[in-house]
Image (tube, rainbow, N blue to C red):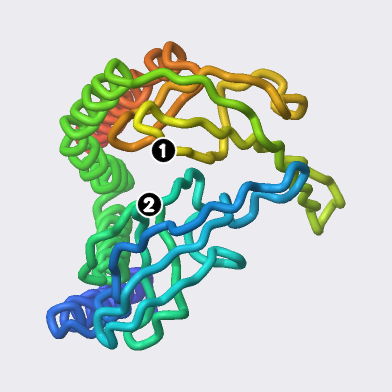
Amino acid sequence: MGWDEFLLLWCAVWGVVALAGCGMSLAGVTAEQRTVRLTGRIERVREPRHGGSRKGGISVVVSYRDPASGQEVTVTNDGECGEMITAAWEGREIGVSYPRGRPHVHRFSNIPEEPGRGLGWAGFALFLVHVGLVVLAAVDRGWPWALIGFCGPWAVFAAFHLPGTVRAKNDRLGRLAAMDTVRGRVVAVLKDVSVDQDDGHTWTTITPVVSFTTREGTSVTALCTSHLADPAGAYGRDVTVHYTPADPADFTLDRAAEHRSEGQDVTFNILVIIVFAATAVAGGVLL
C-alpha cells in the first residue's frame, strides 16, 4: 500500500468516525447529552488547614436537587470531583454534573455549565481528516501545500476569534475599574510536594488562602495564586483585596498588574494571525 492509498484510507476511516459522532449527537445519545447538568448551592465552607494540601480546592458542602427523583442531595468535594473549587462562600452557586440516574457520582465546576451536544470527538475526527487531506496534497503536489493547508485555516480561525478576544479584554478592563476594595487576611498557606517518578526531582507548590468579607457582608475564602510577595511566609498577613461585587470569585491583590496584563492576549492573537497568514502566503508563492 502506497502513501496515497494509506492517506485515502485514513481520511475515509476518520470521516466515518466523524459522521458517526454527528449521528449520535443528532440522536441525543452521546455521553455529554446523557450527563445531567444543574446548579448546586454551597451550604457550608470549611476553612483550609494551614500547611495542608490544595487538592480539591476549598473544602465545601454542596446541595442540589435531582430533577428526575426530586431528591435533595448533599455532598462534599472530597476526592476527585471535577474542577478545583478556588473560591467559596455560603450561598454561592456552582455547576454540578453527573450521569443520568446517578446523582451521587458528581463532578463540580466553578460556574454552572450549559448542556453540550457531545461533538468533541466528531470535531477531532474531522480535524484528522483535514490533516490527511493536507498531507495527501503535499505528497502529490509539493510540500508548499502543507504550509497553505495547515497555516491558512489556522490564520482564519485566529482572525475569527480576534473580535471575541478584544471584547473579553474590554469587559475585563471594565470589571477591573468597577471593583470594590476591602481588607483581607491570609488564613492559611497550603503546601503540595510532587515527585518525578523518572528522576526523583521534587516540586513544591505553595498556595496562600485569602479570606475577606465583601461590603455586602459575604464572607469569602479563596485560593490566591498570584500577586502576593513571599507566599510561603504570608500566613497571617493582612492584604488589600479588589473584587467584583457581582462575583467575588473574580478578585485580585494587584489591580494595576492585572490591568497591564490584559493586552497580552490580544497581542498574542494578532501575532498568531500574522505568522500563520505569512506562512500560508509563502506557501502560495513557492508553488
Q: Does the residue at mark 1 contact the one at mark 2 (Cβ under 8 Å)?
A: yes
Q: Position of residue 59 (x, y in %)?
A: 58, 55
Above or below for 23 versus 172: below
Q: Check disc 2 and report its element: helix, strand or loop.
A: loop
Residue 87 visible in the current orientation: yes
- The residue at 36%/77% (across/down) is 72
Q: Nearer the viewer, residue 73 or 174?
A: 73
Examine the image and state in which quarter residue 276 appears.
top left
Q: Residues within 10 Å of mark 1 (few under 14, many from 20)?
A: some
- Report the disc number at residue 91: 2
Above or below for 127 versus 259: below
- The residue at 78%/48% (across/down) is 193
Q: CA distance from mark 1 to mark 2?
A: 9 Å
The amino acid type found where label 1 is placed reads: Thr
- The residue at 37%/26% (across/down) is 215
Q: Position of residue 285 (x, y in %)?
A: 21, 31
Above or below for 52 versus 215: below
- In which quadrant will I find the N terminus? bottom left
- Report the disc number at residue 218: 1
Q: Residues within 10 Å of mark 2 (few under 14, many from 20)?
A: some
Q: Nearer the viewer, residue 254 or 135?
A: 254
